[in-house]
């Protein structure tokens, strides 16, 4: 895997040290995996069936609490999954929890989901990032399937965020009305995109809308990054000033690299 992987772009955090209102969901082909068989081929169901089980979620609070609104203190979510225990681990912190993203098996599977709260022109939004392909050729071989799986399983992820950070949402219930922006990172221009899934409350229940854009925002621009732009100069209506998730900022427009 070494020489082939070196030819493909690797997300920046791999170089970091450890630390429509429709309720219908899109049809997705489901691939069966033989029970009890653990494969290192990165086609795994990632988060299993699209059912959230609170008993299988482990939550770690690292330097944050539910009294600080994310418009004033940075807040990120790092969610990983264990194929051995079928448990989810959620770290809630001011930056990505690098310690969760180490080890060869994780780097092969790339099934993590990370997210951050951002305030753009006075409105809160949750930005969720998924790695589809790039980094090594195995991911590239199943990129379309991975995109389908992430799209199907993200409601489980969003429910894990809401449940795990329950204190924050009880203190600030309006955060469940914040828009969810989903970033699919891929070295394939057809899959490298960002989508608006609407309010968090709805996205966690229904998932990806048939047309992933909200009525008042119009067509989602694939330029990187979205959403519609933070202020160009320092201000009080945008926070944080820069994204907390250091993913490559390759520009995409109309499905073609610039």
Image (cartoon, grey):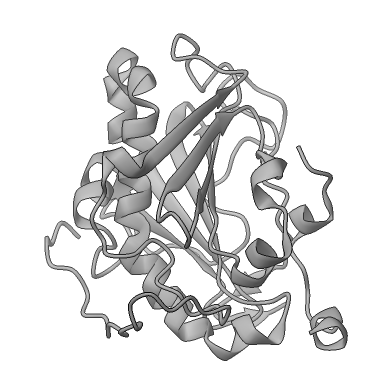
Furthest residue to the front? 36
Using the rendered image of the protein, determine whether residue 217 is visible from the camera's viewpoint. Answer: no
Say left or right for 22 vs 35.
left
**Residue 103 coordinates in the image, percent (x, y):** 72, 58
Say left or right for 78 vs 149.
right
Q: Residue visible at 66% across and 33% down?
A: 95
Q: Residue visible at 82% across and 48% down?
A: 16
- Of the pair 212 and 7, the residue shown nearer to us: 7
**Residue 112 coordinates in the image, percent (x, y):** 55, 56
**Residue 72 coordinates in the image, percent (x, y):** 57, 16
Does 63 sit above or below residue 198? above
Q: Quadrant of residue 3?
A: bottom right
Q: Quadrant of the C terminus?
A: bottom right
Q: Quadrant of residue 51?
A: bottom left
- Of the pair 12 and 160, the residue shown nearer to us: 160
Furthest residue to the top? 67
Q: Residue visible at 20% across and 60% down?
A: 20
Looking at the image, how many numbered discs can be counted on the residues?
0
Say left or right for 72 vs 235.
left
Does 106 sit above or below residue 256? above
Q: Quadrant of the N terminus?
A: bottom right
Using the rendered image of the protein, determine whether residue 230 is visible from the camera's viewpoint. Answer: yes
Say left or right for 19 vs 63.
right
Furthest residue to the left? 23
Does 169 sit above or below residue 113? above
Does 118 sit above or below residue 115? above
């Amino acid at each position: 895997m070494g020489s082939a992987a070196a030819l493909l772009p690797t997300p920046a955090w791999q170089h970091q040290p450890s630390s429509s209102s429709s309720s219908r969901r899109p049809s997705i082909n489901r691939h069966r995996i033989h029970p009890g068989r653990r494969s290192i081929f990165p086609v795994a169901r990632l988060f299993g069936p699209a059912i959230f089980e609170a008993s299988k979620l482990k939550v770690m609070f690292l330097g944050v609490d539910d009294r600080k609104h994310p418009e004033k203190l940075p807040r990120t979510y790092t969610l990983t999954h264990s194929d051995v225990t079928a448990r989810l681990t959620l770290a809630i912190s001011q930056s990505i929890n690098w310690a969760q993203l180490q080890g060869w098996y994780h780097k092969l599977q790339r099934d993590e989901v990370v997210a951050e709260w951002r305030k753009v022109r006075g409105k809160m939004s949750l930005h969720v990032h998924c790695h589809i392909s790039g980094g090594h050729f195995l991911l590239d071989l199943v990129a379309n399937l991975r995109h389908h799986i992430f799209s199907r399983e993200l409601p489980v992820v969003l429910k894990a965020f809401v449940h795990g950070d329950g204190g924050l949402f009880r203190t600030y219930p309006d955060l469940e009305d914040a828009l969810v922006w989903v970033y699919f990172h891929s070295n394939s221009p057809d899959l490298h995109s960002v989508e608006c899934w609407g309010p968090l409350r709805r996205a966690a229940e229904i998932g990806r809308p048939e047309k992933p854009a909200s009525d008042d925002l119009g067509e989602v621009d694939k330029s990187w990054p979205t959403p519609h732009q933070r202020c160009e100069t320092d201000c009080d209506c945008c926070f944080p000033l820069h994204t907390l998730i250091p993913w490559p900022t390759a520009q995409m427009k109309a499905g073609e690299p610039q």
